[in-house]
Amino acid sequence: MITPTPSVVTLNTPTRRTVPFEGQGGLAAVVSELTAEIRELYLADQVPWVVGYSGGKDSTAVLQLVWMALQGLELEQRTKPVYVISTDTLVENPVVAAWVTQSLETMRKAAEAQQLPIQPNRLTPEVKDTFWVGLIGKGYPAPSPKFRWCTERLKIRPSNSFIRRVVHDHGEAILVLGIRKAESQARARVMERHEKRRVRERLSPNGNLPNSLVYSPVEAWSNDEVWTFLMQQPNPWGHPNKDLLTMYQGASSDGECPLVVDNTTPSCGDSRFGCWTCTLVDKDKSMSAMIQNDEEKGWMLPLLELRDELDVPENSHLRDFRKMNGTIQLVGDRNIPGPYTQKAREDWLRKLLNAQAWIRGNAPEYVQGIELITMDELHEIRRIWVFEKHEIEDSLPRIYKEEIGEDFPGEPLDQHLAVAADEVELLLEVCDGDDLHFKTMRELLSVERNFRTMTRRSGLFDALESTIKRGYYVDAEDALELARRNHQNKIAPPLPGLDEVSPDALA
């Protein structure tokens, strides 16, 4: 891997105005000055650019400026690539997701026609990192401020992986972002701190990714100035900015513009626009407003209802009393529950598929093919349930058939199961209906079945012992009482890691 120190280039660029659109020349002068600056930065070296595009107003304005600047170059000067990246979490607000997808396709065709080195890229999280694989597959509870497991997996990893590949291939990269100081005081402080360490005129170091610099062309613009630019300057790739404004206005009951589709930009007003499953806000005001302002968007009601069901203040009744590794964790005298139970995960899957089936049958034609959960995610969830959680009932195909009305397109797993489907009831009977003991027995059988095909069965006894430790309690109250007694007497807990896991961690 090539990791050179970012080269230092000094530009004769005038200092940006504090209030960009005031003064002689107004908007036209600011745009002319900025596009000239962008061209100078572009021609200064061979370092590729990566433009972050969320479909929102700020990223649209930045990309539009870059596009206009490149149009002003001769063909032989357009030598290095400008990668446009847009991260689709797969649970974005469907209206915004459709907007961004269409915009990227329009952008791709326009760049080819105009002979510009702009390459749009739609990024998605790896299947193991998606929202539904985490929540329904692994059982992570709905995200909360104390356990925000989604942001890193859904947003940061896809974009960082792409940028790292660019850095690997070219040695360094310049990120062009629509961040603005006016967004929040916290954002302004961070930007000002990085400004002090600038190694090039207008380029700040990236605190997260080595060998990458950040260029923020509209950092001094206000919210109104962004809109002024977008409304007065035609979109160069042909995606009307007035449609963008309409989408903003439709997402707010008061006509403001609460559209935010990246994970760091603060909301406009009290609303936000991002993942429809987001439980990090009190209410999805933008989706509610869209439904309220447009009868045709009533098809999104099932999404809003499911999101509200996920966002409950107390969900311990839906979660296992143990962590994923079997530990009981106390904070004071209170037990911190672990992942969603098998029943809860099956119920979430059923509700999600039911919403998908209803939308496909009742929504306008342009969304009847909506896919709230991908087939790849369903296959991964099934694998986790059967082979990692040892849920030998293999219930996913049955749930899929009941909710979608079609056979699940996956291979039968009978030959991989420790207990055949028709023998599960017998195992329940042997366990005398005790759910905890049933789950322990099926896991023991499944663990043994997994080791059976191995040439060397090293680790089998450790795996069996770990399973027994997870299920050797009489019930949840017995486990909690034992943990409290051990904690009070300062005796080492019977299971490893009692005091090593943070209150909301699951691993």
Image (cartoon, helix red, strand yellow):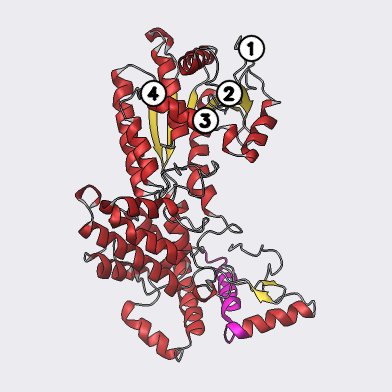
Q: Position of residue 44 (x, y in %)?
A: 55, 12
Amino acid type, callout 4: Gln
- Does 321 sit above or below residue 23? below
- Report which residue position mark 3 lands on: 177
> Against 284, is 241 above or below?
above
Q: Residues within 10 Å of mark 2 (few under 14, many from 20)?
A: few
Magenta residues span: 456-477
Q: CA distance from mark 4 to mark 2?
A: 18 Å
Camera-nearest residue between 261 and 404: 261
Q: Which mark is residue 232?
A: 4
Badge 4 element: helix
Q: Which mark is residue 10?
A: 1
Q: Read off the residue under disc 2.
A: 19
The residue lying toward the viewer, choosing from 112 and 384, is 112
Q: Tag 2's secondary structure?
A: loop
Mark 2 vs mark 1, foreground winner is 2
* Disc with the residue nearer the chain's start (3 vs 2): 2
Residue at 42% of width from left, 30% of height from top?
A: 60
Tag 2: residue type?
Answer: Val
Q: Which sits earlier in the primary sequence, circle 3 or circle 4?
A: 3
Q: Is residue 454 visible?
A: no
How far apart in space, not on screen, are marks 3 and 4 (Cα)? 21 Å
